[in-house]
Amino acid sequence: MAVIFEKSVPGRHGVSLPDCDVPEGVEIPDTLRRRADAELPELSELDAVRHFTELSRLNFGVDTGFYPLGSCTMKYNPKALEVIAGLEGFSDLHPFLPQLRHGGMLTQGALQVMHELEHALCEIAGMDAFTLHPMAGAHGELTGMMLIAAYHRHKGNRKTEVLIPDEAHGTNPSSAAIAGYDVRPMPTDTRTGMLDVGALESMLSDNTAAIMLTNPNTLGIFNRDIEQVVEIAHRRDALVYYDGANLNAILGKFRPGDVGIDVMHVNVHKTFATPHGGGGPGAGPVGVRENLEPFLPVSRVVKRPDNTYTLDYNRPLSIGYVAPFYGNFSICLRAYAYLMLMGAQGLIEVSENAVLNANYVMNALKDVYELPYDTVCMHEFVLSARRQAEQGVHALDIAKALIDRGFHPPTVYFPLIVKEALMIEPTETESKETLDAFIAAMRAIAEQAGSDPDALRKAPRSTSVSRPDETRAAKTMDFRWDEPFREKGG
Ligand SMILES: *Cc1c(COP(=O)(O)O)cnc(C)c1O
C-alpha cells in the first residue's frame, strides 16, 4: 500500500477556507519564518479520507473479529462506555480544577466516581483499600512491590528476595526486579499445573519479602492451595502479592482478600472492558489490606462528613506519586460505567460464561492438539502443538494459518513451561457460532498439518506482509519515508 506522500500532487488541497479579509494582528518576525515550505502531502479531502480508512482496515480488533489472545482478555467493550467517557462534564475537566474553592462543584462528580470505583473494587476483591493510579497491569505490580518494600522498611525488616512460580505472568519477575528485589523462580508441580507447595516451603526464608502469585495462573488453572500458601508465607512475615489480571475467571466466585492476600492488582482494561491493545491506555488499580493502606500513593480521595469529596495529599508514609495527577481517569470512568451496566449478577455471569466458553473450546480441540494439563480450566487454557511439530508444523505456523481464516492468533510460545504453547482465551462475549467457527478452523489446520504442511508454513497469504523478520524489524526500526517526496522537489 502506498504511503500518503506517494499520493501527493503539488497544489492539490483538501480544505477551502475563505481568504482572510482582516489585517493580520501580529507580524511574524523574519527570523521565525520558514525558509522552505513544510514538507506536507497535498491531497484532496476524499483522498485523505480513503487513505486513512484503508489504513484502518489493515488493523485487526475485537470489533472486526474473534481475538482469542490468551492472557489478554480481548473481550468486547460496550460502546455505551465510550459515550459516558465522552460526556463533557468528565472529558472537559482540567486536572488543576480546585477541589474545594467554589464549593469544588466542578470536580465533585469525578471524585465521586473515583471513590465509588475504589469501593466497588474493594467489594469485588475483598480488599480494604484500592488506589486507581497505576496506569497498566505491570505498573500495578511495580506499585504493589514498592508498597511491600515500604511495609518492610517501616518495620525494619531486611528482606531482599521475592519468590515467583515459573507459571506466573512474565511481567511479575520484571516488576519485582525493578522494585529492587532478587527474583527466585519456584517450580510448578508437573502433575497439577500448580505451584509446588513443598518447593515453596523449602525456598521460603526470613529473607523472603514476598511471594508473587498469578491466579488463575498462566496455564488457566486455579490454585486450590492458595490459602495454605498465604499461611506459609505469613509465618515468616513474607507478604503475598496476587496478580489479579485474570480476574475475569473469578468475579463473584472468589475474593483474594478473603484468603489473606496482602496486595493485588486488577486490569480494568481486561476484566472491566475498557479498551486496550497496542500499548495502552489502561489502568491497573492496586488493592491492599488495611495494614498497607498508609503506604498507598498520593493523592487519596476522601469522603467528608457532609458527603462531599476531596483529595488528601497529607500522607507521611505514602510511597508518593506513581502517575501524573490521578492516573488514567477516563479509563477508570469506563470501568465504573461497566460495573454499573453489568450489576452484581451480571458480573457473576461474566465469569461463568468466560469459564464455560474456555472449557467448551478446550474440550472440542483436545483430541487433535495435545492438552498438557487435562483438567477443568478457568477462562483460558494452553494447548501444545507438539504433535503437529513432528509433522513440521509449529505453533507459529498454526497462528499464521489462523490469520488467513479470519481469526486473530492465540498467544504462542507462552507460558514457557509448555513446549509449542498455544494459549487460548475466548472470553464471555463470543457466541457459540463464533466459537464453533474457530474450532472448525483449528481442526482444519490440524488436518492440513498432515496433508499439506508446506502450505501452512507459507501462511498467511491474505495480508500485505506475510512473515516479517520480527527481530530485525524490532531492532532496526526505521519509520522514515522521505526520499521520493524530496525527489519531486516538494
Ligand atoms: C496482562 C497481564 C499483566 C500485565 O498487564 P499490562 O496491563 O499489560 O501491563 C500481568 N499479569 C497478567 C496475568 C496478565 O494477564
Image (cartoon, rainbow, N blue to C red):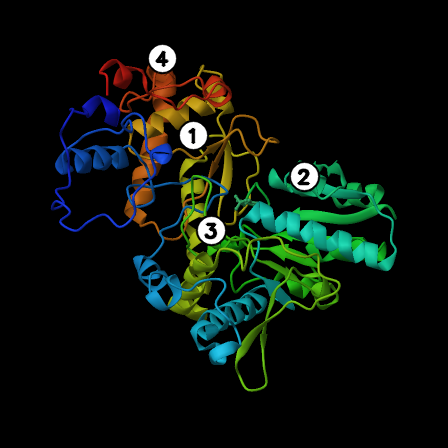
In whole angstroms, how far apart are the C-alphas of marks 3 and 4?
36 Å
> In which quadrant is the N terminus drawn?
top left
Q: For residue 240, what is the image quadrant?
A: bottom right
Q: Residue at x 67, y 48 (%)?
A: 213
The local crowd at label 4, few if under 14, some if 14 to 19, many if 20 or more residues have their Cα within 10 Å, is some
From the image, tell me which residue sits under label 3.
Answer: 270
From the image, tell me which residue sits under label 1.
Answer: 368
Q: Earlier in the sequence, mark 1 or mark 2?
A: 2
Specify whether tag 2 is near ligand 1 (CB below 8 Å). no
From the image, tell me which residue sits under label 2.
Answer: 173
> In which quadrant is the C terminus drawn?
top left
- Does the image show residue 184? yes
In whole angstroms, how far apart are the C-alphas of marks 2 and 3?
21 Å
Q: Earlier in the sequence, mark 3 or mark 4?
A: 3
159 relative position to 279: left or right: right
In whole angstroms, how far apart are the C-alphas of marks 4 and 1?
19 Å
